[in-house]
Image (spheres, rainbow, N blue to C red):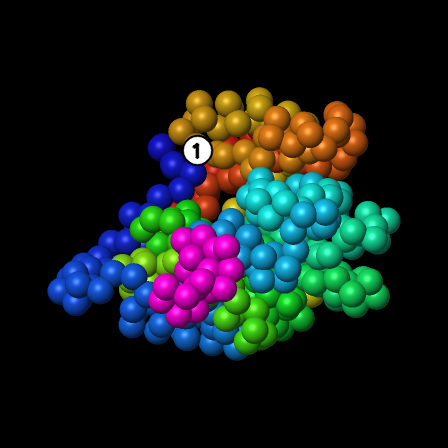
Amino acid sequence: MNIPFSTFTPMHNEIKADMQACFERVYDKSWFIDGEECRQFEKEFAEYCEAEYCVGCGNGLEGLYLLLRAFDIGDGDEVIVPSNTFIATALAVSYTGATPVFVEPDIKTYNINPAEIEKAITERTKAIIAVHLYGQCADMDPILEIAGKYQLKVIEDAAQCHGATYRGKKAGSLGDAASFSFYPGKNLGCLGDGGCITTNNPQIAEKARAIGNYGSARKYHHIYKGINSRLDELQAGFLRIKLRELDRWTKARQQICERYLNEIKNDQIILPEVNEKNTHVWHIFPVRTKKRDVLQNYLKERGIGTVIHYPVAMHLQDAYKDLGHEQGDFPIAEKIAREELSLPLYYGIKNDMVNYIIQRVNSF
């Protein structure tokens, strides 16, 4: 049996006609940037996230950057980020001239550990980026409490968490603002790069939109030193179609992961845990084992594709040598980097494939 880590084919086959019709509609209108498809998607996605405002942008990294800029964060400032995340979270901080300050994750959920945040706060700290990693929201109540105590902004990095909830509230409406990625592999993905920000603050929405439009809210009148970061019409149209199917696709992912949680029984395998406050949307299904590389090769030899998220902890990336961190500075993040392996997970995976994956993991 040959099982890829992921494939879009079952999902895209179901919506092919609608996607082709969308292409023809946008093509015939000859309006490709900042048009009706984008405005409608922003409205629909804001409603989906239970947020007041949504602003399309080029990708999730740029969404974080736009928000940091909109909150006037820059040179000399510090922003707290989890030590276990994709590098985009830290890069957005670096692009503003601010410094990312790493904080260890909770080993059970892999999200930032609120108990470790306060000791990392200095007089230069301006914000906390709470990454909702792997499809599960960070523990927002204590994060928001700490932020209130020190008058910090809370930005959600919701790139992997479309539709997830924390205490019944949707990701994207939990902090001061949020950034989403619509990279094709995300639970809600377009057919290229794309992203957006959500917020309940009209000033932040307006400023982020302007910064992403060359710093301009009115053509040829530039308020800020902005960038070009806009969601194009075609991708917005594709996302509108996919958004209508997202909850159904998410339910299928949850059913697959429920089977993994209930049926994988191997003392060498550590399964992910779900915070009782959360509804998990399972962007990936991460397991851990001290024999990670051996397990990956074992599964590969049996036709099962896997991916490591992420093999090098953030503070040990060459890009952040300038921060002066060494091996051992963030042992929990390093442990996850050594041990994590993501099992196949996608809409349309067949039951016999799931059966086979579970059997092979259990026989490891």
Q: Residue at x 64, y 59 (%)?
A: 72
Above-or-below relation of 163 to 106: below
Above-or-below relation of 45 to 347: below
Q: Residue at x 72, y 50 (%)?
A: 77
Q: Is residue 61 found inside the magenta-colored segment of the image? A: no
Quarter placement of the C terminus: top right
- In terms of secondary structure, where does tag 1 sit? loop
Q: Which residue is mark 1?
A: 305
Q: Is residue 165 visible?
A: no
The picture quadrant where one finds residue 212 is bottom left
Number of marks: 1
Q: Residue at x 45, y 62 (%)?
A: 222
Q: Residue furthest right?
A: 119
Q: Residues within 10 Å of mark 1 (few under 14, many from 20)?
A: many
The picture quadrant where one finds residue 332 is top right
Q: Is residue 217 found inside the magenta-colored segment of the image? A: yes
**Residue extent of the magenta highlight:** 210-229
Q: Amino acid at mark 1?
A: Gly
Residue 18 image position (x, y, % from top left) = 22, 64
Residue 51 image position (x, y, % from top left) = 54, 74
